[in-house]
Image (spheres, rainbow, N blue to C red):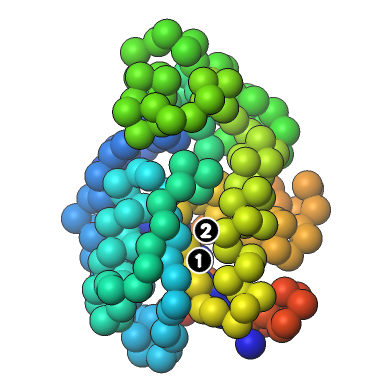
Amino acid sequence: MAKLVLIRHGQSEWNLSNQFTGWVDVDLSEKGVEQAKNAGKLIKEAGIEFDFAFTSVLTRAIKTLHYALEESDQLWIPEVKSWRLNERHYGALQGKNKAKAAEKWGDEQVHIWRRSYDVLPPLLDVNAEGSAANDRRYANLDPRMIPGGENLKVTLERVIPFWEDEIAPKLLDGKNVIIAAHGNSLRALSKYIENISDEDIMNLEMATGEPVVYDFNDKLEVQSKKKLD
C-alpha cells in the first residue's frame, strides 16, 4: 500500500502580513520554519519513509520540504520541482492586503475570489511589474502557459497533468511520496484524489505545516486519510 503525504508550506511572511501571495516568491516566517520542522518530526514519529519528493518552484514550499525531510532524516531522497505545483496565481490581487482588498471591493466579492471554484480574480497584465513572464524560473515555458490569474478550476487543470505523468506512476509502483506545496494546489490535488464536488471543495482547508497522509491500494483508490498532529 503506497502512502502520499501532502504538506502545505509553513506560514510565510505574507501569510503573517495578510497579503495575497500567489506566485510571488516570499520566504517562510520564523513560525513557518518551526511548522515545517515540526511536520518532519511528526513524519519521523509516524515512521513514514519516502521514495520520492515533489514541490513547487517557490521558496516557501521548497524550504518546507527540506526542513521536513531533514527532521525526518530523509533529505537525501530524489526531489522534483515543478511550476505546476505552484500556488494559484492571484492575478492583480497579488501583494495586496486582504483586509484592504475587502474594504475596496467588499467582503463578499473578495471571499468569492478567494474561495470559489471557477471565478477568476482581476487579471495581472503580462507587462506589469511582478508578472511571472519576467521571472527566469519560467523562461522555458510557452508564454501562453503563464497565467495572469487563476481560480481553483484552472489550478486543478495544470496540476493534474503533473499528477498523471509524474506522481501517480510512483504511487502505482508502490512508492511512498511526499509533496510540499501550497494551499490551493494541494486543495486541487485533494479534490481530484477524493473526487470532491465543486461545492464541497469550498470548505476544504489545508493548515500550514500539517501533514496529511493518504493510503492507496494498487488501483490508486484512497483507503484511508489522516492528519498527523
Relative to the observer, which residue lies in front, 225 or 81?
Answer: 81
Which part of the image, by quadrant, shows the N terminus?
bottom right
Q: Which image quarter: residue 214?
A: bottom right
Q: Which residue type carries mark 1? A: Leu
Mark closer to the chain start, 2 or 1 = 1
Tell me which residue sits at (72%, 33%) in the image.
118
Tell me which residue sits at (43%, 30%) in the image.
140
Instruction: Specify the farthest residue to the front.
Output: 140
Q: Which residue type carries mark 2? A: Met
- Residue 215: percent from the left, percent from the top? 63, 81
Q: CA distance from mark 2 to mark 1?
A: 9 Å
- Residue 122: percent from the left, percent from the top? 57, 17
Tell me which residue sits at (69%, 28%) in the image.
119
- Residue 114: percent from the left, percent from the top? 58, 35
Q: Quick check: 60 above or below 207?
A: above
User: Mark 2 or 1, which is nearer the eye?
Assistant: 1
- The answer to whether mark 2 and mark 1 are in CB contact below 8 A is yes
Q: Quick check: 156 above or below 109?
A: below
- Residue 201: percent from the left, percent from the top? 70, 52
Relative to the observer, which residue lies in front, 30 or 159?
Answer: 159
Which residue lies under the disc numbered 1?
A: 6
Which residue lies under the disc numbered 2?
A: 206
Q: Quick check: 61 above or below 45?
A: above
Relative to the observer, which residue lies in front, 181 or 217?
Answer: 217
Tell me which residue sits at (72%, 82%) in the image.
218
Query: Is residue 83 toward the left or the right of residue 163 in the image?
Result: left
Instruction: Specify the farthest residue to the left.
Output: 30
Question: Does any portion of residue 35 appear in the rendered image?
Answer: no
Q: How many residues crowd around disc 2 within 10 Å: few (fewer than 14), some, or many (20 or more)? A: some
Q: Which image quarter: residue 135?
A: top left
